[in-house]
Every structure is written in C-alpha cells, then in structure tokens.
Image (cartoon, helix red, strand yellow):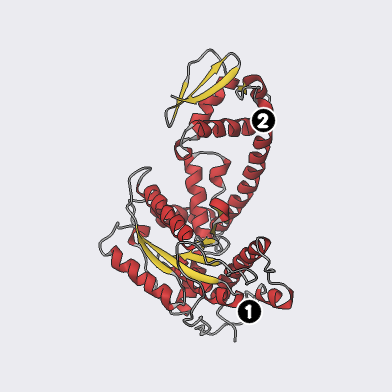
Amino acid sequence: MGPHPAVAAIRLAVRRVLHDLLTEHSRTTDVPAPSGPRATALLTPPLPWAGAPRAAHDTALAPSYELPGPTAQEPPRAAPHERPPSPLVLVACSGGADSMALASALAFEARKLGLRAGGVTVDHGLQPGSDLRAEEVAQRLRELGLDPVESIAVNVGRLGGPEAAARDARYAALDDAAERHGAAAVLLGHTRDDQAETVLLGLARGSGIRSLSGMAAVSGAGGRYRRPFLQLDRQTARKACMVQSLPVWDDPHNSDPAYTRSRLRQEGLPALEKALGKGVVEALARTAQLSRDDADALDAWASQAEAAVRDATGLLECAKLYALPPAVRRRILRRAAIEAGAPAGSLFARHIEEVDRLITGWRGQGAINLPGKVVAQRQGGRLVIRQD
C-alpha cells in the first residue's frame, strides 16, 4: 500500500523541485539529467490524490544513511575523468510542521534521486531555551538521515521591526550556510496559507502589483531558494507529520497578537472566510501567481524601455518618461532611485508617486527627499536622482 495522501503530496512537490535542480545541474556538468521510464515514474504520483482511505501510518520513511561528500568550506571537486559530486540540497527547518514535513520529504526523495541532502536550523535567540530547542531540531534532522546538519545562532536587530529583522537575520544565516557547504539550493517550507497571508500584507501596504505577487517559487541569488509547498495547504504538511509520527514544535510567536502576521493568521483570514466563504486562501494564492506574471512582464518592459529614455550622459529625459505608461515609468523611477542608493525595503509607493509628479505634474516644485539620503529633482527637462 502506498503512503498516506498527505505524505504523497509533499513528496511529489519535493520530487519535482529536485528533478528541476538535477536538470539545471546537468547543464553545467557532463552528467545527464534523469530521463526515461525511471525518471517518469519518479515524477508520477504512485496513487491518485483522492480515492480510497490509506493506511494511518507511512512506514516508508528513509532510514539513516551516510551521504557522500565532505562538509568543508568548498564543495568537493571531482578529479579529472571522475564523475562530479552530486548537488547538495539543504532544508531550512524551524521544527514546525511545515519545515519538518519538508525535511522528511527531502530525506526520502534525495536518496532516490542520488542527491546529497542536509539541513539548517536557525536559533534567533528570541525565546528562553531557544538554543536547546534548535539543537533538538538539528538532532531530528540527523535522525532523518540528513547530513550535513547545522544549528546556527544569529543576532536579531531592530531595523524594519521585529519580524523583518528576524527574517533578515535568518536569510543571512542561510546564505552563509549555503555558501560554506556549496549547496545548490535551500528548500523553504512556505505553504499556500503563507502565500495568502503575504498577499494580504502586501495589499495593506498598498505598494502595487509586485507586493501582491507574494513569494516566488524560486528566488534568491542564482535561484538559491526553492519553495516546493506553495501549492499545498498548511494542513497537508501537518497531517504528513502526524501520520509519520514526526514531532513538531509550534512556535508561540505564531499565535502572539503582537506580530502582524500572527494577527492576520488568527483573526484576519478566519474573518474573511466567514464573510466570503471557503476558498479565500486558494483565491489569494492564485492572485499572487497572476500578479507575479503581470509584474514580471511589466519589469521586462521597463528594462527594455529604460535605455530609450536616457540621454547621452545617462540622465532620464522627462518628456520621454511622460510618454510611457505609468506602470512602466514608475518602475524605471524606482530602479533609478535604488541605483542611486535608496534602500529597496524603505522605498514605498508614495515615494515613487512624488517623484512621478516631477514628470507628470511639473509646477516648479523642489527636490523630493527619498530614503537613503537620495534626492530627486528636475533640472532642464532632465530628472536627476542622486545621493547627497
């Protein structure tokens, strides 16, 4: 009998991402990507998603096993005429249901595909005993057969608020771990529910279509971060942990009303579902994908149009900017402000709207002050954006 439907779902999602990574890896090596009947079987779910009840427990968890390759500062290098080492994939794991389900699926699927698999847990130091809890999570990852496994302590600052500061510290630690181990990718356990929350937070900020596009399935430098679960709901991940008897840790911060995302999760989304009916989460996640497609197209248009609106010295020409559609023009203005030194995370829609008025509503107004000590002003039909 096959695995429980929830386990099958998380494994299939991870399998597809790992297959993509192998395909990408094959383009830079002489090793061909999996193909033929075996590869087809690996990417095909063993049983239909819906159907007869499955066994309550899945006994097909990967046992502990040794994965090849050192954990030195650089990835292992193949000697001449030797087969290059298989890519290393890390999972970022907090110990919660989403990331534990992801870790178990990675351990199971990586072995089948011949990939090395490791794990990283980050201790934010925001709660008493967080160091001990992080080590417990690391031990659980080792028991799944992941290697290398690291527990990394970080110092969380205050810039941008507690949630943003913790996120920045976490990604910095993950980037560092990926670099040190030469990892091809880091898997993140964000689910469809997380995506819906991100869309609503973006809507509240009023920062435009890019904010509504949520989290990308592939992001980071070189496509480092992969999110296999964006099409799966949170309950599927939790069910997968339960039927596999995987212990999970529920972070109390996730239900703490002091945090915006927590309030949205505990109060906002349930209120929307009560008012609008079920299906709000799925609709928001679908909105994210549609918004991302539109934003990507507009970004590409702006990138192509930018060269045509600059003069020989590189300054932006106001008349040519005025002729562009607002969505394209504002993207060019935003990019120019960031290139001048404005922090992207502090540059909001209202800032770009003020700069845009120098183009569309010119009445002799003075310079516009932007974050990062960047100033935008109109001079002789040109838009000058510089850092003071």
Q: Is residue 144 left or right of residue 302?
A: left
Picture layout, residue 99 above or below residue 329: below
Helix, strand or loop at mark 1: loop
- Residue at point 56%, 83% (across, down): 54
Of 255 and 333, the residue lying toward us: 333
Quadrant where the N terminus is found in the figure: bottom right
Of 146 and 257, the residue lying toward us: 146
Q: Tag 2: residue type?
A: Ala
Quadrant where the C terminus is found in the figure: top left
- Residue at point 56%, 34% (across, down): 335
- Residue at point 47%, 35% (across, down): 347
Q: CA distance from mark 1 to mark 2?
A: 56 Å
* Most distant residue in the left direction: 128
* Label 2 packing within 10 angstroms: few (<14), some (14-19), many (20+): few
Of 56 and 62, the residue lying toward us: 62
Helix, strand or loop at mark 2: helix
Residue 230 in the image: state x and y as whole percent: 56, 60
Residue 3 in the image: state x and y as whole percent: 56, 81
Picture layout, residue 201 above or below residue 50: above
Q: Is residue 166 left or right of residue 118?
A: left
Q: Is residue 132 left or right of residue 374?
A: left
The mark found on residue 336 in the picture is none
* Label 1 packing within 10 angstroms: few (<14), some (14-19), many (20+): few
Q: Tag 1: residue type?
A: Gly
The tag earlier along the polypeptide, 1 or 2, is 1
Residue 140 in the image: state x and y as whole percent: 40, 74
Q: Which residue is mark 1?
A: 51
The mark found on residue 307 in the picture is 2
In this orientation, does residue 267 appear? no
